[in-house]
Image (cartoon, coloured by chain):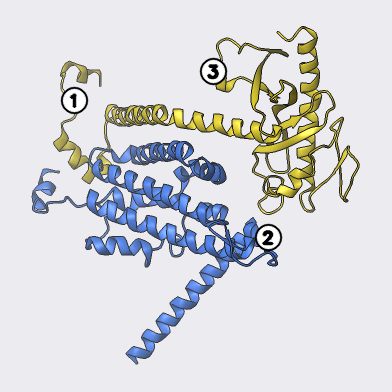
Chain colours: A yellow, B blue
Amino acid sequence: MSGHSHHGAPPEPAAPSEQQDQTPAEGSSSARLLFTLGFFGALAGSLLAFTYQKTLPAIQKFAGEKVEVAVMEVLGAPPKLDTLYLIGDKLSRTPPAGVIPGDAIKLFIGIDAKGERMGVAVEEVAPGFASDVRLMVGFNPSTGALTGFKVLSQTETPGLGDKIEKDTAFASRFTGKIALPLKGTKSVTTDPSTVQTITGATISSKAVIKVINKAVETWKPRLEAFEKEGGK
Amino acid sequence: MTTEAAIAPAAAEPFVPGAPPPAPLRLDVWRGIADDNPVMIQMLGLCPTMAISNQVSNGLGMGAATIFVLVCSSFLISLLRKVIPAEVRLATYILIIATFVTIADLVMQAYSPVLSKTLGPFVPLIVVNCIILGRAEAFAGKVGPLRAVADAIGMGLGFLLALLIMCAFREVVGSGMFLGHPLFGPNYEPWVFMIMPPGGFLTMGLMFLAMGWWGERKKALLKKAVA
């Protein structure tokens, strides 16, 4: 087979290959099989690289917009946003080195017209019934009171579990509740530390509560530590 | 070998074993929609049909993505059918199909992110949709590009038709909506069962039942006309 390299020309001219298709029993040489697969692999690779580069800006832009819309919604449309970045277990004003800003883990601080802090928003995730439930959670870090939440991604059961995203009444039940921590109950409640779950979607509802508790539990101390050190 | 080639040199298109009989392009298109409908007659592609058919918008997106992949891969495979050695044809077909599926997935993520999110893993899974590899092996790999594209369009439209029948029924009954617009007012209690997987099986069964009844009726009428 190495003899082919001496010819300089392609190993098989086009004409005999047509005959080989008519008589597949004859078989093709390994070199031709390798060449065909290698050629199509390279072609597929370059086509995909091209499409990936063409679509990447639009995909990233949408992901960024989606996060921004969620932050605005859970914090009640603050006029100004401050962003802190998580490096290791510490918050910082400067983004981590060597990471695309879109990929860094962030905490958003909503600031009102008087310069007062309205609340903070963070992304958190926990397993639900059929999928990971990812939320943007907005809360007041000094009291633990929720300002709202927005589902970023979930693939819970259609018609039941997905009500955590589609049922707006469910989301409104959380506003003003105190997550230190928050508990779920099956009946209507006015207690600030309990919230009513959705009938038929208990596990998905509890996943939402779990995500919210996790967000407040992990991010409240981080923010307190950051402020203790002078907020640099 | 040489004698064999001398016996049948006249035909413009060399004989390909298992090639479909010649037919006008119009028939190649029509076959996929009706007589050989991929879902309702060939019973292929049932998995995505069942999984995403609870909303009309899903059906449109899935149908469009599948038609794109089917037409592009059929065209390319037909064009290259004499270059691809028989031993590695399936690997090459899958490579070509997977490339177009990934392109469709990326384009959908970029320009129709909401739809891409609801279809979830079922867009990348078009790679293993039997309809596409089935057409590549049974048709596109054995005929010229024009017929291959006609067949792909027909099969794609046939798949879309079956999807839309399932989607429309399940969305109207299961959520009381059509394309996201409420139909029945606030007092309608949606039959949630129908948009869940068991509802998919039930709808598919009903669709096949209707097809069977229609086929039997047609046969009976034909018999009557002959007698």
Q: Chain of mark 2?
A: B
- In the rendered image, which quarter is residue A180 located in? top right
From this viewpoint, which residue is outermost toward the bottom?
Answer: B227
Q: Is residue B18 visible?
A: no
Q: Residue A55's spot in the image, x, y percent?
A: 42, 31
Number of numbered discs on residues: 3
Residue beneath label 1, please? A10
Mark 1 vs mark 2, CA separation in Å: 62 Å
Cα distance between the residues tagged 2 and 3 = 42 Å
Q: Which mark is residue A100?
A: 3
* Residue displayed at 66% across by 36% down: A73
Expressed as whole percent of the image width and height from the top left, the position of residue B64 reads 42, 50
Relative height, residue B210 to residue A124 (above, below) = below
Residue B203: which quarter of the image?
bottom right
Quarter assignment of residue A120: top right
| Residue ID for mark 2 | B192
Horizontal side, residue B50 vs residue B34: left or right: right
Whether residue A188 appears in this view of the structure is yes
From this viewpoint, which residue is outermost toward the right?
Answer: A191
Q: Mark 3: few, some, or many residues within 10 Å (few <14, many ≥20)?
A: few
Classify 10 Å Cα crowding around label 1: few (below 14), some (14-19), many (20 and above). few
Which one is in front in this view, the residue at disc 2 or the one at disc 3?
A: 3
B146 in relation to B201, above or below = above
- SS at mark 1? loop
